[in-house]
Image: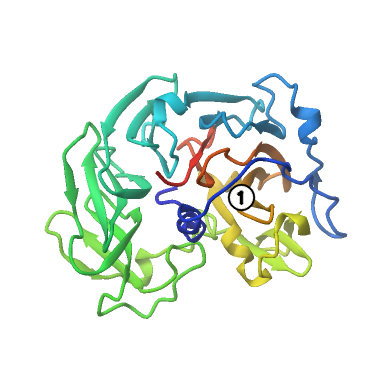
Amino acid sequence: MKALPCLLVSLAILLAACGDDDDQAAEATEPPSGATDVEEPASPEETADEEPGAGNGQVIDGEARGLYLYSPDNGELEQVADRNALGERGVGLDWFPDGESLAAFGADLVRVEVGGDSHFIYEPEDLTFGTAVSPDGERIAFSCSGPASADVCIVAADGPQLTRASEDEYFDYLLNWLDDERILILSDSRPGAPDIPVYEGHFPQLGGYFVLNTADGNIVPATPADVADPWLSLEGEWTFSVSPEPPHAVFSDGGGGSIEIPIESEDLAGIDPTALPDQFQVAWSNGDTYAALVQRVVFDDGSFIRSAYNVWLVDLNAATAELVVQTEPCLTDLDCLVTVDWSPDSGSLAILFGIAGD
């Protein structure tokens, strides 16, 4: 996961407020005829007293924000960094290529080791979101925005010197590294955009794709080979889509098989069905072994739209889906956000839970 997927949701959340918690994430229902197995999650009441390592629909309290690791092999859920280590925010996450640590953007950008030790990298001066570690692990890129600008910024993995790599009059947003020098970006209003439709799940779904060369600062139009659909699995065998009537999240293989996850209508709080894709982010593991689906569950108490999240583990080989984590709404003046990323060996799913803004 290089930049935050589904950042349309993220930016909207940055401007949203939330209130007290009065509901929990809804339970899944039985899949329709023809769908593959979707395991019925335990209710928040049933899981509230489980031990912290239980997984399997475990509820994370809105005050227990931080960085968690979930193991699909044994169902263990472990917190490796709490809000004291990361700060209140949680807007960017990416594994280092060695699989031993992660770059996590909370209030500051920090490096969190799998064992739990945290190392400060950079304290931002601007609003930031998205995090992408270069393939060689030497640099970290993220989007940084001021009152009238949006650029791609880069720091060394050992920090803290900042470079604004795309500083000009255009609004640029990080997507991912293509190699150790080139970064794929979306750029709003920049002339010369290629004739490549902007995929769902790529923020801000306007402008066009460009490639930023960090060695010389040149920005050129991207080619189709540079751009990958974030809702297509890494091996190209599976695709994700959302069916609005009735609402379902659907993983489809190339042979006509599918894994369907029903969406409770009360989760939508009046959201236009055409905007359903904005409520999801997908993280694909290497080798098309797993997918992680993050579903935003929306509550409207009459004053605020507030967000809880369901994290589904989709086993692409077994064709099953299981709700493994539920987060409660954050009890803050700003809404909360969950982002996920698979380790390079597909053995661990990192889950970052924090508020979306300062």
Please state the total of marks drawn on the protein image: 1
> Residue at 63% of width from left, 55% of height from top?
303
Above or below, comparing residue 61 to residue 297 in the picture: above
Res 76 seen here = yes
Answer left or right for 325 relative to 99.
Answer: right
Which residue is nearer to you in this view: 307 or 98?
307
Answer left or right for 123 relative to 68.
Answer: left
The residue at the far front in this view is 303
| Secondary structure type for disc 1 | strand
Answer left or right for 258 relative to 168.
Answer: right
Query: Which residue type carries mark 1?
Result: Arg
Kindly indicate the quadrant of the structure image that contains residue 120: top left
Res 113 seen here = no
Residue located beneath label 1 in the image: 306
> Residue at 57% of width from left, 47% of height from top?
18
Q: Quadrant of the C terminus?
A: top left
Residue 104: x, y in percent?
39, 36
Residue 242: x, y in percent?
66, 64
